[in-house]
Image (cartoon, helix red, strand yellow):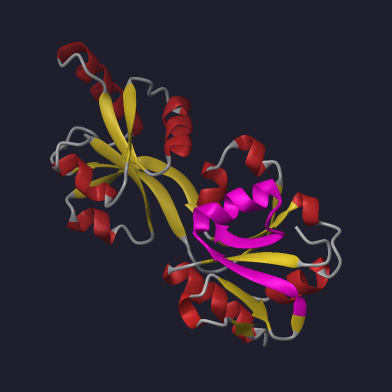
Amino acid sequence: MTKNILNIGIPSKGRLRKDVLKIFKKNKLNLVSERGERDLLGSIKQYKNIKILYLHAREIIERLGDGSLDLGFSGFDLLKESEINIQKKINVLTKYNFGKATLVVAIPDPWIDVQTVADLEEIAFEFKDKKTKRLRVATKYPNLTREFLFSKGVTQFNLVDSLGATEAYPFTGSSEIITDITSTGETLKANNLRILKDGEILKSEACMMISKSSNNKDGIKKITRLLSKN
């Protein structure tokens, strides 16, 4: 990483990208890309020492952790899902009033006897004893899901990596239940899924984060002050 260059990571797609770009625009920071919106590299017109990299929101966390990004915008959920050694190298500077969502445990509607995580524990043991297999949980958040379920005393389960629409997994025979990120819960309801009463794992929002190795770089405080204005 060049000593006097500040590398800033912005999500490359989705609503998070649009909302982050609004912060730059609101603070009169003009982003420039030579090849337009599809360009993965950019700059700020007024700051020649700043380089913009458009990356997947999960990758932004990784790059902040290894120090190849100085600043980055991503979800709090993705930070907490990352490995502990990565989290220790990152500080959250600002939590914004957008990108709000909650990671939850959701089950099929027909499971009328299951209302809480304690009920889920009973089901998990039934699966093990009667069906000689473990309850399968589809998720894109294996670390947070494992930690939450263990903390609630649920241990008899297997995690299934979700590669797409997680809410479809229970109805394609790929899992029994899921954990997923949701902002309103409407998509879960539309897919005949119900959030457990005490199934909230983590509340999330969009954040500006800094690599701890960049705390004292020239110009970092000035740009973070500007970008902290929501």
Q: How many marks?
A: 0
Q: Is residue 151 above or below residue 1?
A: above
Q: Which quadrant: the N terminus?
A: bottom right
- Residues drawn in magenta: 48-75
**Seen in the image, is 222 located left or right of residue 76?**
right
Residues 49 and 71: in front is 49
Dividing the picture into quadrants, the one containing residue 146 is top left
The residue lying at 15 percent from left, 36 percent from top is 173
Position of the C terminus by quadrant: bottom right
Q: Is residue 14 magenta?
A: no
209 left or right of 34? right
Q: Can I make out residue 228 in this image? A: no
Question: In this view of the protein, which residue sits in the foreground, 184 or 144?
Answer: 144
Residue 211 appears in the figure: yes
**Which x, y percent locates residue 162?**
32, 43
Q: Position of residue 125 (x, y in %)?
A: 26, 17
Could you say where residue 192 lies in the image, as x and y percent from the top left?
17, 50
52 vs 34: above or below: above
> Residue at coordinates 51% horizontally, 53% vertically from top-left?
58
Q: Is residue 82 above or below residue 72?
A: above
Q: Position of residue 24 (x, y in %)?
A: 62, 80
Which residue is pictured at 81% across the width and 56% down the height?
215
Does the magenta run of residues contain 63?
yes
Q: Look at 68% across and 58% down and name the residue there.
A: 69
